[in-house]
Image: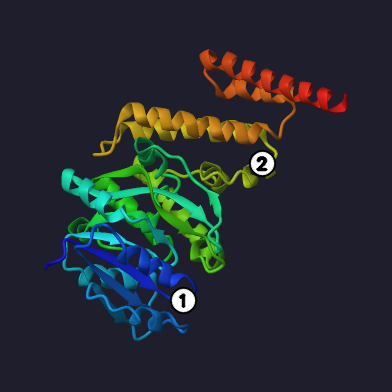
Amino acid sequence: MLPKLTVLMPVYNAGKFLAAAVDSILQQTFREFEFIIIDDGSTDDSVAIIKSYDDPRIRLYLNKDNIGITATLNKGIGLASTSLIARMDADDISYPDRLQVQYSYMLANPDCALVSSMVRVIGEDGRFIRQDKMRSEHVYYNLTFICWLYHPTVMYRKEAVQEVGLYTATYSEDFELFWQLTRKYSFHNLPEVLLDYRVTDQSLHQVLKKVEYESAQQQQVLRNLRYFAGGHYTIPSSFIQCYRHNFEPLIAEQDLRRWISCIRELDYITQCILEKLNPNLEEESVKLAARYKREFIISALIQHLPLHTQVWFRMRVEPMRSLARSIKSLLKSKLRYKTALLTKNN
């Protein structure tokens, strides 16, 4: 029986979690797939673990040398015999119906080039860490600043990925590919949790290569902003960090005028995004996503200010119709805090 779907999983020294990842794919309710596993020069028992499986759907390839995840993924895409490719990582766990849900969605939506899903973030021992909540219609706006899609949850069309040049970045390769795809094609993030995303001490983007990935993403975000605002557009690094929800650099500047400028610059960027044609552009969704992001940033910044300065700051960055609501909410929270403090002391 010819496969209808390819599952692509690169492996590098993943022996500790590999069996759970492989099992989660082989036990899928959707069974008509080929499972391309590429070992990228592992020095642990990863290859032995893979070879212990006797399942004709597994196609194991061994890189002679360690060539990195970008080149390995591009190799796998070339090897795939189907148009639809589901990504998988060697330390994560796909839920049993993941492939069926995503395959059905892609069949029902032929114009969609990529579909992803929600995840549960877990630790090395499988303990629950968090579950992000993001609406699909807000992902397009936020993808300008942060890689809001989890790489091992995506299923994409091989031809679309090839058309945009495959994976091209050494670091933050997923963010780069998603950006290129979403300039030309529609995408969707399913509301269901379909994967447990494991964070380990070997996670490249969060531990081993954190500095390299962060530097790459800084450059990618600036490129993204220039796509909307013009090729010569530039803003301070602390603004980009703030939009990526790292507030420490901007706070450290201790300059409220810069904070105000950062918020107003975000408003300008939002307007530029609204004016740029894109298959994923939904005006009201962008406006709502921008409002949420704006308020999240303001709330994060002003908690470092005394009450009277918080009011002053909001007066300079908020429209008058929302200012009264913000001040009222701020005063209520302060009152609740004082009441709780008095109750505790009594």
Amino acid carrying mark 1 in the image: Gly
- Relative to 128, say whether 279 is above or below: above
- Relative to 24, say whether 100 is above or below: above
Q: Secondary structure at mark 1?
A: helix
Question: Residue 229: in sight, yes or no?
Answer: no
Q: Which residue is mark 2?
A: 251
The span from disc 1 to disc 2 (Cα, nearest Å) is: 42 Å
Q: In terms of sequence position, does the residue under pointer 1 or pointer 2 come before the other?
A: 1
Residue 327 placement: quadrant = top right
Question: Residue 46: in sight, yes or no?
Answer: yes
Residue at image position (34%, 35%) is 137
For label 2, the crowd category at 10 Å Cα-Cα, with few meaning under 14, some 14 to 19 and many 20 or more, is some
The residue lying toward the viewer, choosing from 243 and 60, is 60
Q: Which residue is mark 1?
A: 15
Q: Secondary structure at mark 2?
A: helix
Q: Quadrant of the C terminus?
A: top right
For label 1, the crowd category at 10 Å Cα-Cα, with few meaning under 14, some 14 to 19 and many 20 or more, is many
Q: Quadrant of the N terminus?
A: bottom left
Q: Does 292 sit left or right of 26 as displayed?
A: right
Q: Where's residue 26, x and y in %?
A: 30, 66
Q: Where's residue 227, x and y in %?
A: 34, 45
Residue 34 placement: quadrant = bottom left
Q: Does 125 sit left or right of 162 as displayed?
A: right
Residue at image position (44%, 32%) is 290
The residue lying toward the viewer, choosing from 219 and 325, is 325
Residue at image position (36%, 69%) is 22
Residue at image position (22%, 62%) is 31
Q: Does 194 sit left or right of 6 as displayed?
A: right
Point out the residue furthest to the left here.
1
Amino acid carrying mark 2 in the image: Ile
Q: Where's residue 89, x and y in %?
A: 39, 65
